[in-house]
Image (tube, grey):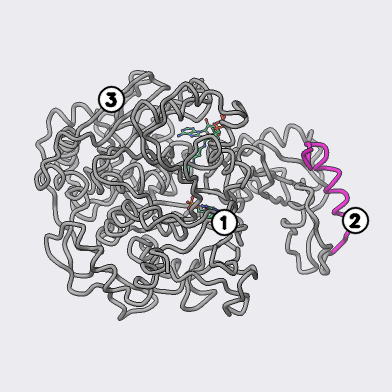
Amino acid sequence: MSRYDEIYARAHNQPELFWEEAAEEIHWYKKWDKVLDRSNPPFYRWFPGGAVNTCYDALDRHIDEKGHGDRLALIYDSPVTDKLRRFSYAELRQEVALFAGALSKLGVGKGDRVLIYMPMVPQTVVAMLASARIGAIHSVVFGGFAAPELATRIDDAKPKVIVAGSCGIEPGRIVPYKPLLDAAIELADHKPQKCLIMQREEKPADLIPGRDIDWNEAMENAQAHECVPVDSNDPVYILYTSGTTGIPKGIVRDSAGHMVALKWTMTNTYDTAPGEVYWAASDVGWVVGHSYIVYGPLLQGCTSVLYEGKPVGTPDAGAFWRVMADHKVKTMFTAPTALRAIKREDPDAKLMADYDLTSFKALFLAGERADPTTVEWAARHLGTPVIDHWWQTETGWSITGNFLGLGALPIKYGSSTKPAPGFDLQVLNEQAIEVQAGEIGALSVKLPMPPGCLPTLWKNDEGYISSYLEDYPGYYKTGDAGYVDEEGYVWVMTRTDDIINVAGHRLSTGAMEEVLAAHPDVAECAVMGVHDELKGQVPLGLMVLKVGVNRSPEEIVFESVQMVRDKIGPVASFKTAIVVKRLPKTRSGKILRGTMQKIADNEDYRMPATIDDPDILEEIAEALATVGYPQS
Ligand code: COA
Ligand code: AMP
C-alpha cells in the first residue's frame, strides 16, 4: 500500500478524524463544536462553532508566534512596469493592518462585502487580506471583464466599498479600469458607498468627489486594525464563476475549512515547507490566484511570487525561467496554455539554458486539459515532475492530483492522477449509477465534500442545489465528464455543459449567445468552443440573420465581435463569427452545437438520428471553411 493509498483510505473511512487532525495546523480563537455538521443535508458545514481569522494565520501567526517577521512573504515581479518589490511578513502585515483600518473607517465590518477590481499588484493582495482581517467578505473580479460583467457582480455581492486600480497593463497597451468601474456602477442597481482607488503612474484616473478616495490618502489617515475573529462558516470570500447561463455563480468560501484544506495541500499536494518560494503564474482574479498566489503560500509561511507579466513577450519566452531563477522558485503552478505559448516561440527551450534552475523541483498544471505533448515537453526540458491536477473554482483545491508530499505516484500523461484524500470521486451514468472502470460518465463527488469546497452559492441555496446537486442526488456534479481507469487514475475529458476553457479561463458560451442574440439583426445564434493550438479552445459564433436584413454580413460580424468584447470583455477571446442561413437542429428544436463543433474540429461524428434536415450540416461545413475550419 502506498502512502497515498493509506492517507486516502484514512480520509475516506474517518473523515471527521482526518480533518480534525488537519485542523490542528491552524489557529483557533475558539475550537469547533463539531468537526462536521451533517444534520441538514445536502448542506454540510465543517467546524461549526469555531472562531478563526484567515489574515491572522496568513500573516500575524508567522510573525508573533514563530518569529518569522523578517521572512519574505511576497515578491512582486512586474516586467510590464519594470518593477520589483519584496515584502517581508512584517512589512506586508503593516500594509494590511493599515488598509484594514482604512476599510473599517469607511464603516466596513464583519460580513460586509468589499469588491476588488484590481490588476496584479501587491495592493490587491493587501486589499484581500485586509478584508479578511476585519471579517469582511471580499469578491475579486478579474480585470479582463467588461463593465456589464462587473455590474452583475456588484448587484449580486452588494459591496459597501469597491477597491479598484486606475488601470491594468497588458503588453503593448494600458487598460484603463476606472472608466469600466464607473460604467459598471452606473449600470448596477446597487451603489457602493465609497470607492478606494489605487492610482498607477502609468494612467492615473479622475476621481469622483464624494465617492472616490485615493488609496494613499486613505492609508495616510488610517490606524492599524487588529484581526477580528469570525465564525468558521462565515465566508472569507465570494468568487464569481461562469455558469451555464449569462448569470455568474457566486461561489462562497467558508473561513475555517478553506484554511484547513489549503494548509493541507501546501504540505501534501505541493510538498512545500515554510520559507520556500512558491509561484502560481495565474491572476488573483481566478481561483488559482486566490488559493495559490495569496492564501495557500501565506498560510504555509512560504514566499509567494506575484508576477505581472505573460509567459511570452515580457520580454520573451524565457520570462518564466527568469522568474524561477531570480527568486529561487521551488514549486510553480500554471496553465498548460502558458507552456504552449512558450513552446511555440522557443520549441527547444533554448532560453532555459540562460538560467540557473537548480532550486526548481516541480511544476503543477491546471485550468484546462493538459495535452500530453505539452506536459512531456515541459518535463523533458525542466527535468522535474510536471503534474497535472484537476480542480475548479467551486472546490478551491484539487479534486485529483499527484500528491508530492505523500510520495509521487507514476505519472500517466493525459491523466490528472488520483482523487485527493477527502474526495469520494465517482463516475455516474445518466441514471446516476456508478459505472465500471474505463467507462465515460459524469465525474461526481459523493457528499459530503471535504473542507474548503463551496458550502453553497452566495444568497442562493436553491441555485446551489439546482446547479450541482439535483441531477445526481447525494452527489456533487462537477460538470466534467471522464473516466477512471483500472488503476484508479482519473481522465478528465470534456465539460458536459456549455462552459469552455479559453487559455485556462472559464467562460460560458451561453453568455456569449445572449450577447449575440441582442444584436438587432440576429434572429438566432450558437456559440461553440473549437480547438485552438495555443488557447486550447476559442469560441466561434454562428448567426442567422432576421428576414429582410440586407446589410453586409462582415459588418454584422464585426459588430458582434465588438459587442462580446464590450459586454463580457477581451478575456472571452471572441474573434470569429460567421453568418449562416440556418442552424442544424433536432426535431424538437435543440441546436446541434456538439455536431457543429466536431465538424469545425474535423472529428468523427454520427449523424444525429433526430436531425431536422441533414443538408444543413453541409452548409455549415462550407461556412466554417470560409473562416479556416477545420484548421490544417
Ligand atoms: N485586464 C485586461 N485585459 C486582459 C487581462 C486583464 N487582466 N487579461 C487578459 N486581458 C486581455 C488580453 O490583453 C487579450 O486582449 P486582446 O484580445 O486585445 O489581445 C484578451 O484579454 C485575451 O487574453 P489572453 O487569453 O490572456 O490571451 P493573450 O493572447 O493575451 O495571451 C497567453 C495568451 C497564453 C500568453 C495567456 O493567455 C496566458 O498567459 N495564459 C496563462 C493562463 C492563466 O494564467 N490561466 C489562469 C488559470 S491557472
Ligand atoms: P475554473 O473554475 O475556472 O478553475 O475551471 C474549472 C474547469 O476547468 C473544470 O471544471 C474543468 O473543466 C477545467 N479543468 C481544470 N483543471 C483541469 C485539468 N487538470 N484537466 C482537465 N480540465 C481541467
Q: Which mark is residue 551?
A: none
Picture coordinates of residue 291 (x, y %)?
A: 35, 49
Give the residue pinned by disc 2.
Answer: 615
Give the residue pinned by disc 1.
Answer: 415
Amino acid at circle 1: Ser
- Secondary structure at badge 1 equals loop
The magenta region covers 612-632
* Dot 1 beta carbon under 8 Å from ligand 2: no
**Residue name at image x 60 percent, y 41 percent:** 374
- Cα distance in 3D space between marks 2 and 1: 38 Å
Label 2 environment density (alpha carbons within 10 Å; few <14, some 14–19, many ≥20): few
**Towards the viewer: 12 or 385:** 385
**Residue name at image x 75 percent, y 59 percent:** 592
Amino acid at circle 2: Asp
Q: Marks 3 and 1: which is nearer the front?
A: 1
Quarter where residue 217 is shown: top left
In the rendered structure, are the residues bearing label 2 and label 1 in contact, judged by CB atoms less than 8 Å apart? no
**Residue name at image x 39 percent, y 48 percent:** 189
